[in-house]
Image: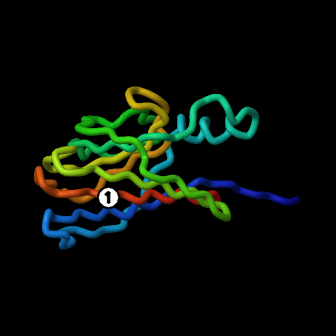
Amino acid sequence: MFTDNIKPQGTLSIQLTGPDGKIKYNEQVNNLVVTVGKNWIASRMFDTSIPADMSHMAVGTNNTAAAVGNTTLNTESARVALTSTTISTNTTAYVATFGAGTGTGALVEAGILNASSSGVLLCRTVFSVVNKGADDTLTITWTITIN
């Protein structure tokens, strides 16, 4: 008997840069692909036009543990369009930049979604506090691997 377990997994690279261009924070964390995200992945095998592509990343301020039933961030503070999406062997990398004045504060959660508001949540993660000042830039590279 042959068993093949396909499992989506993700990691984030979080980098906070000050207005002087110096890196203030750099961390890599794992994420959780939530149930609605897994359903989104499965639906793409049938019809790539519905539902919409992942297009946005959000950050927030609530550190409640990520759970498979999540459909949104707990306390979203900013959402931006992805700056790039790259597909390679078994992986998709999403990149978003939260520029000066966007998503400031004590950030502890992030997610990938397929709309500028509401939408389907692919992944959610909680991480150590990143204190983003008004002049700082936060760049998140989120890589999803299908094993």
**Residue that label 1 marks:** 139
* Quadrant into which the N terminus falls: bottom right
Q: Quadrant of residue 115?
A: top left
| Left or right: 114, with 81 as reference point | right
Determine whether 5 is above or below 21 in the image. Answer: above
Determine whether 107 is above or below 55 in the image. Answer: below
List the single residue furthest toward the front: 20
Snapshot colouring: rainbow
The residue under the point 63% across, 41% down is 41
* Quadrant into which the C terminus falls: bottom right
Residue 79 percent location from the top left of the image: 32, 39
- The residue closer to the viewer here, 40 or 84, is 84
List the single residue furthest toward the bottom: 22
The residue under the point 79% across, 58% down is 3
Residue 72 percent location from the top left of the image: 38, 33
Q: Quadrant of residue 21?
A: bottom left
Residue type indicated by callout 1:
Thr
Looking at the rendered structure, the secondary structure element under dot 1 is: strand
The residue under the point 21% across, 50% down is 107
| Left or right: 109, with 20 as reference point | right
The residue under the point 40% across, 46% down is 124
Residue 100 percent location from the top left of the image: 18, 50
Q: How many circles with numbers are drawn on the protein?
A: 1
| Left or right: 35, with 103 as reference point | right
Determine whether 17 is above or below 49 in the image. Answer: below
Residue 130 percent location from the top left of the image: 19, 57
